[in-house]
Image (tube, helix red, strand yellow):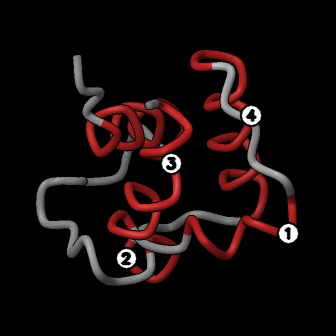
Amino acid sequence: MSVDVKKIVLEIIEDVAPDEDLGGLNPAESLRDQLDLDSMDFLDIVMELRKRHKVEVPSEDYPRLATLDSCVEYLSPKFA
């Protein structure tokens, strides 16, 4: 059973930033540049990953969650 990491990340972003339009997201571009996310929103996303899916992201790895593509690349092994 493969997990759709992209869908998981988008669902969490949708909950953290409900006013954002995720339809036109460029998966290779910085999420913070495309969406109005501040550092608290970003922390909320990391916390939701831990709360919902028991996925730990150490703070030194936060830069690896900059784009949707890098989120999928970084998180996929954690869901395997």
Which residue is labeled 3 in the image? 75
The amino acid type found where label 1 is placed reads: Glu
Quarter location, residue 56 = top right
Label ID, residue 34: 2
Does 41 appear above or below 46? below
The amino acid type found where label 3 is placed reads: Leu
The amino acid type found where label 4 is placed reads: Met
Question: Percent from the top left, x then y, of residue 65?
Answer: 56, 65
Which badge, 4 or 1, comes first in the chain's sequence? 4
Residue density around tag 1, few if under 14, some if 14–19, many if 20 or more, within 10 Å: few
Which residue is labeled 1 in the image? 60
Q: Nearer the viewer, mark 4 or mark 1?
A: 1
Which badge, 2 or 3, comes first in the chain's sequence? 2
Q: Tell me the distance, in whole angstroms, between the alpha carbons under discs 3 and 1.
A: 14 Å
Residue density around tag 3, few if under 14, some if 14–19, many if 20 or more, within 10 Å: many
Does residue 76 appear to the left or right of 44 in the view shown?
A: left
Contact between labelled residues 1 and 3, with CB atoms less than 8 Å apart? no
Question: Percent from the top left, x then y, of residue 43?
Answer: 76, 49
Q: Tell me the distance, in whole angstroms, between the alpha carbons under discs 2 and 4.
A: 21 Å
